[in-house]
Amino acid sequence: MAFLKPTRVFIIACLLLSVRPTIANTHFDDTPGSCKIFGDGDVYGPGIRLGYYLQWVAVLFATWMAPDQARNARTAANIITIAVFANTFRGAKDGSLVAAEWWIVLWLTFVLSLLNVPVDWKRSSSSVGVMLILWCMITAAQPWLYFKGLDTGHKSGCTVKVFFFTGINVYNHVWRTFWKVGSIVECLMGLSFFIAGVIVMIAGLFNSGDDSERDGDASKIAQRMVLTFGQLITGVITIVQVEMTIKVNHIDLSQSTLISSGQLIPFLIGCLTVVAVFGHGLKSLMKRVGVAADGPQGSV
């Protein structure tokens, strides 16, 4: 745990240093008759998406190999999400094409981490609490999106599609009406997430949890199996929805290369998180093997 504090500082510092003065919102090509969409790499560029996907992979394995590292992965994802939200809400204020952008952000920041909850949440109260509050930010804003924001950045004669197992025109009356109703439900969910997040963080101050999650307790193992299966399903679906939404809209992200700082940093954070999980998992395995090897000698 001693290395975690400087790691957090490093992550935050890198994200702050990656902020660029030039803003490139998601927008249609200004050329008359063109419906080409240029994407905002600071919100869903390749490095940011890969960073989220790697955090998801890290949590999947950390649940079994190194439970403590799942908390670190969650913390790193929370920090990236704060940066993504800052750019997303800034873009909405500046006229970004939110019809495509917010769908992608919702899946990356909410659905992908939907079951990223430890069995013993009290040992991860800070990261879980912050994650719940971040969920509140994106879900509580959904009514604005479907009642008003959907037309922001729209270009006459052009359409925007979201991929929900098939390409769907977001300006379709039935689709929009459905999500106007659904957004109210999401907003109420968002408020509950905020309350839950505050409660979790306060509860964590008075209860540090126990080490039972590390043990071979049958009920804990069963819970982890259910969570892992759910995380696997939501993760695969999220990746498909995000990548296909970008594909069906032919969103151009060529200006956001993986080697640019805004993409490379979240990607490296994801890579380092995965390495940390496997490193700690291997260390724990070697320790158990060592204990097992010493057992017979100690009994002689």
Image: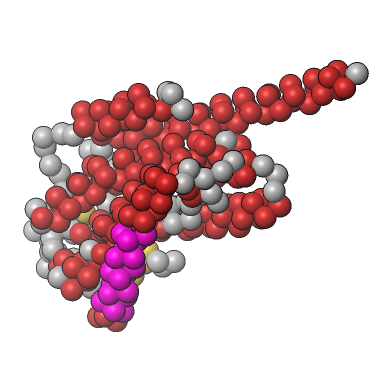
User: In the depicted view, which residue is nearer to us: 279 or 169?
Assistant: 279
Horizontal side of residue 151 vs 258, given as left or right = left
User: Residue 80 sits in which quadrant?
Assistant: top left
Picture layout, residue 187 above or below residue 85: below
User: In the depicted view, which residue is nearer to us: 281 or 172?
Assistant: 281
Residue 9 in the image, given as x and y percentages of width and height: 30, 27
Please state the extent of the stretch shown in magenta in the rendering: 178-197
Residue 229 in the image, given as x and y percentages of width and height: 59, 55
Residue at the location (41% across, 51% down)?
203
Horizontal side of residue 35 vs 214, given as left or right = left
User: In the depicted view, which residue is nearer to us: 159 or 189?
Assistant: 189
* Residue placed furthest toward the right: 300
Work out which quarter of the rendered image holds the C terminus and state it. Answer: top right
Residue at the location (46% across, 46% down)?
207
Q: Is residue 194 magenta?
A: yes
Picture layout, residue 51 above or below residue 121: above
User: In the depicted view, which residue is nearer to us: 10 or 157?
Assistant: 10
User: Residue 149 sits in which quadrant?
Assistant: bottom left
Picture layout, residue 127 above or below residue 289: below
Q: Report the colour scheme.
A: secondary structure
Residue 57 in the image, given as x and y percentages of width and height: 51, 42
Residue 264 seen from this side: no
Residue 108 in the image, given as x and y percentages of width and height: 36, 52
Q: Is residue 252 magenta?
A: no
Residue 173 seen from this side: yes
Residue at the location (34% across, 30% down)?
8
Q: Main secondary structure of the magenta part?
A: helix
